Image (spheres, rainbow, N blue to C red):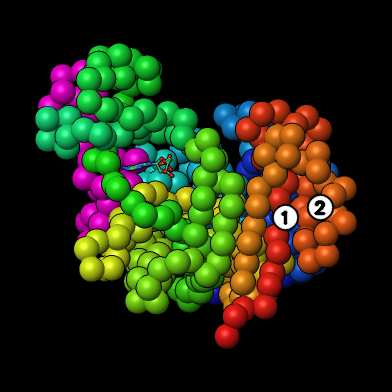
């Protein structure tokens, strides 16, 4: 198989945040080097062998970066398409540019999912106030208007409720390409984090249950509260998506769990993240192989590791000033603390997380 790395080789990563940092740490444990490329310095720079500060459009810097690595990956989904194509012409980019293209645009992503027979919220493309009026007439209120691109942590979206002015809602998101989604009255939010190897093998961690505060992930617990058959179905969906994308690396599929009459449950896929994910940080302390190591194994063309869980998991994000409690957390037996080395604890900023792994009740 071509494009298989060996210890001592270098992984290139676009993006210098905490995800890149944790990938770099996992790579180092396996004797691999990392070269981080980002327009701004960030937490990953502290732990990599090499870094480049340059724009994603700087072809000279990109070419030098490609020359210095054996494979290119990324820690965020908004890598410009031209950057991905430029690098892919020189070195393997994993996951590939197609996974980026599909997951960068909510309309393309939902269309792709529906074509695979995977349920999403009902949706319609909205490019004007007139489109929005028509879409609201079909999908009803409440519904959720989102920008097609560049949304994260609840940014780039607004709820359309009874009485809301549609022109105001459309303009509040910048008046660009949007998508309207029917409102999903979900009971819980879950995620599946899986990895697909170069050989097509697939391994998923147990389903995560996620709680948000102010649109930012605050707590993940595993096992999720969901019927075993639903958990199996959720993992099968992630595997189907990864195979359809001819994916290599860690993939995350965020889903809504809807409770129906008589205790039945149903899944609705919300979005795909073509990367490691915050809801998988527990795997550093609570699984045989962490999501970061699994990503490194996959993009290096190595065998995937076991995703088996060590116990019942609770992971908390430390957002902004919450990280000031670091000393008290260190004093707690059984708490594994992770700090990302960010200097400024701005509001809403992910500063670190902690995980507790407890024996699973029989
Ligand atoms: P997203 O940016 O798509 O991940 O959405 C952020 C959050 O908004 C989700 O985690 C949900 O809590 C909520 N949300 C997004 N889309 C919908 C929807 N169609 N129906 C109900 N809630 C939604």
Please check the rendered image and state whether residue 110 is part of the magenta-colored stretch, yes or no: yes
Quadrant where the N terminus lies? bottom right
The quadrant in which residue 106 appears is: top left
Would you call the spot at circle 2 few (<14 residues within 10 Å), some (14-19), or many (20 or more)? Answer: some
Q: Viewed as shown, does residue 190 lie left or right of 33?
A: left
Under circle 2, the secondary element is helix
Q: Give the range drawn in magenta.
A: 106-134
Residue at the spot 52% in from the left edge and 70% down from the top edge: 223
Q: Viewed as shown, does residue 119 lie left or right of 322?
A: left
> On residue 256, which mark appears?
none
Image quarter for ligand 1: top left
Q: Alpha carbon of mark 2 to alpha carbon of mark 1: how far?
A: 8 Å
> On residue 329, which mark appears?
2
In this view of the protein, which residue sits in the foreground, 190 or 260? 260
Compared with residue 29, is residue 276 higher up or lower down, i.e. above or below?
above
In this view of the protein, which residue sits in the foreground, 141 or 49? 141
Q: Can residue 348 be seen in this view?
A: yes
Going from the N terminus, do you reach mark 2 or mark 1 first? 2
Q: Are the residues flagged by discs 2 and 1 in contact, CB closer than 8 Å? A: yes
Residue at the spot 35% in from the left edge and 76% down from the top edge: 229
Callout count? 2
Horizontal and vertical percent for residue 144?
30, 34
Would you call the spot at circle 1 few (<14 residues within 10 Å), some (14-19), or many (20 or more)? Answer: many
Compared with residue 113, is residue 101 higher up or lower down, i.e. above or below?
above
Compared with residue 161, is residue 355 higher up or lower down, i.e. above or below?
below
């Amino acid at each position: 198989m071509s494009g298989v790395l060996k210890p001592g080789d270098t992984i290139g990563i676009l993006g210098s945040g905490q995800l890149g940092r944790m990938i770099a740490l996992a790579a180092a444990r396996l004797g691999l080097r990392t070269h981080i490329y980002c327009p701004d310095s960030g937490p990953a720079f502290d732990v990599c062998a090499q870094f480049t500060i340059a724009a994603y459009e700087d072809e000279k810097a990109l070419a030098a970066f490609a020359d210095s690595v054996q494979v290119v990956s990324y820690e965020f989904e908004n890598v410009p398409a031209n950057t991905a194509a430029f690098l892919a012409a020189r070195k393997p980019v994993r996951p590939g540019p197609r996974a980026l293209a599909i997951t960068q645009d909510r309309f393309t992503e939902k269309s792709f999912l529906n074509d695979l027979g995977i349920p999403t919220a009902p949706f319609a493309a909205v490019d004007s106030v007139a489109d929005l009026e028509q879409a609201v007439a079909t999908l009803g209120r409440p519904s959720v208007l989102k920008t097609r691109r560049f949304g994260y942590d609840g940014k780039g979206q607004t709820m359309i409720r009874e009485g809301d002015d549609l022109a105001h809602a459309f303009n509040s998101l910048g008046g660009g390409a949007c998508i309207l989604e029917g409102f999903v009255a979900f009971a819980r939010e879950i995620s599946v984090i899986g990895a697909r190897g170069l050989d097509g093998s697939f391994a998923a961690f147990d389903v995560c249950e996620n709680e948000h505060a102010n649109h930012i992930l605050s707590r993940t617990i595993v096992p999720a509260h969901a019927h075993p058959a639903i958990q199996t179905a959720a993992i099968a969906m992630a595997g189907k998506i990864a195979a359809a994308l001819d994916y290599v690396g860690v993939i995350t599929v965020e889903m809504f769990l809807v409770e129906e009459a008589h205790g039945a449950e149903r899944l609705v896929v919300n979005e795909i993240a073509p990367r490691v994910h915050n809801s998988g940080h527990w795997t550093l302390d609570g699984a045989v192989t962490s999501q970061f190591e699994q990503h490194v194994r996959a993009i290096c063309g190595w065998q995937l590791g076991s995703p088996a869980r060590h116990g019942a998991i609770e992971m908390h994000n430390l957002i902004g000033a919450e990280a000031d409690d670091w000393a008290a957390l260190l004093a707690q037996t059984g708490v594994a603390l992770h700090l990302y080395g960010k200097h400024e604890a701005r509001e809403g900023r992910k500063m670190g997380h902690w995980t507790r792994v407890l024996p699973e009740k029989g």
